[in-house]
Amino acid sequence: MKKNEVIGLVDFYNAPELGELTENRSLGSTSFLGRYAFCDFALSNFTNSDIPTVGLLIKKHQRSIMKHLGSMSSWITNTKVGSQRILVNENGVLNPLTNTDVANIRENDWVLYDSNASYIVFQSAHIVANVDIRPILKEHIARHEKITSVYTKIKDASQEFERGTLVRVDGDGYITSVKQNDHLKEEALASMEIWIINRTVLAEIIQRRAVWNERAGMQEILKELLYDGSYKVHGYEWKGDYVRSFDSFDHYIRYCTELLNPEVAAKLFDPEWPHYTLTHDTPPALYGEDARVVNSFVANGAVVEGTVENSILSRDVRIAKGATVKNCIIFSNVKIAEGAHLENCLIDKYSIIQKDVEFHGDPMKYAYLKQGTIL
């Protein structure tokens, strides 16, 4: 694959809303395991797959995304050939119903007309997996395909990809149908929302299709193309060990906490497939003499003097002496005072839990304390 032959687009438009957790931020920029944001994994896939030119299709909450990305240099391994651009549809601010990823590309049409790329790769920000784009692209080129859609086999459609789409594939490897997950307890083929489209084909699709249906995004247009026979869509089965669609608050909790299990974490954190993120140059975590930490992720900059069990602590969290935190996810800059006792909850950033406060959520459904809570 030649440099600049491919443009990677991280698509924030398809990310589901997770209630109050994503009220003021995009899911793509939401904290993950105390150190990362979800978009880091799509960006790292492009970096590790030698795709140096990347655009981020931003629907809303640009502030939170820009704050996380910083200078964006964390994901560029060669600044001479690589670049990353924020793509915003300014008209979409006034017209939210027509603010789609397709409209965004039309607004930022350098992707279609001012580049020498032959292929455009889309990847949604809320699906986490280590995906090497190179063998998918190689097959796409070898078969002379115009559109390739990546899918994966899931064991239980009632529990996985709950807001996702399921596909069927014929014997020649072409997708024959696409439908919303109907949550049946059975094996299924789920779209990973990774698409490879020839640039000239994408330009033609957007020119002809987006005009008569301004509310249609890339997913909807691909479905229409499939059913009216305009283009065949090649299906590529991804067979990796770890893929999760963070499509509900319960899934966010479940999938984050399952990574406290070393066997599960080893499937995602492959030393041969690094994950890049913005560095903050904060000091290492500091543990007091009486600190007790069991089976937890503790980010750099945190100070722990109390007890932490089965929890995830982000940067600059303070756990005072005598405080106890069990089965919790705590975002950055949260202060937990002496004697406080917290269980089964997610505490958003800049919150303060005062001395001797006790707060317990349900083990099966974590409580959420919104940003800036004082309890």
Image (cartoon, helix red, strand yellow):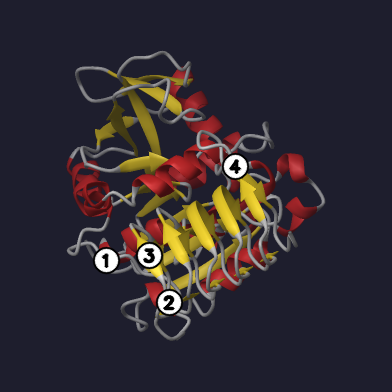
Closer to the camera in the image, 196 or 47? 47
Contact between labelled residues 1 and 3, with CB atoms less than 8 Å apart: no
Gap in Å between the C-alphas at discs 4 and 1? 34 Å
The residue beneath circle 3 is 293
Report helix, strand or loop for mark 3. Answer: strand
Q: Which mark is residue 10?
A: none
**Quarter the C terminus occupies:** bottom right
Closer to the camera in the image, 364 or 266? 364
Left or right for 186, reference 237: right
* Residue 94 locus on image (x, y percent): 82, 51
Depth-wise, is mark 1 or mark 2 nearer the camera? 2
Left or right for 83, reference 189: right
The three-letter code of the residue at mark 2 reads Asn
Gap in Å between the C-alphas at discs 2 and 3? 14 Å
Report helix, strand or loop for mark 4. Answer: loop
Q: Which mark is residue 300?
A: 2
Gap in Å between the C-alphas at discs 2 and 4? 26 Å
* Residue 147 locus on image (x, y percent): 36, 38
Contact between labelled residues 3 and 2, with CB atoms less than 8 Å apart: no
Q: Residue furthest right?
A: 94
Earlier residue among tags 3 and 1: 1
**Quarter the N terminus occupies:** bottom left
Report helix, strand or loop for mark 1. Answer: loop
The three-letter code of the residue at mark 1 reads Pro
Q: Residues within 10 Å of mark 4 (few under 14, many from 20)?
A: some
Depth-wise, is mark 2 or mark 4 nearer the camera? 4
Earlier residue among tags 4 and 3: 3
The residue beneath circle 4 is 361
Depth-wise, is mark 2 or mark 3 nearer the camera? 3
The residue beneath circle 1 is 274
Contact between labelled residues 3 and 4, with CB atoms less than 8 Å apart: no
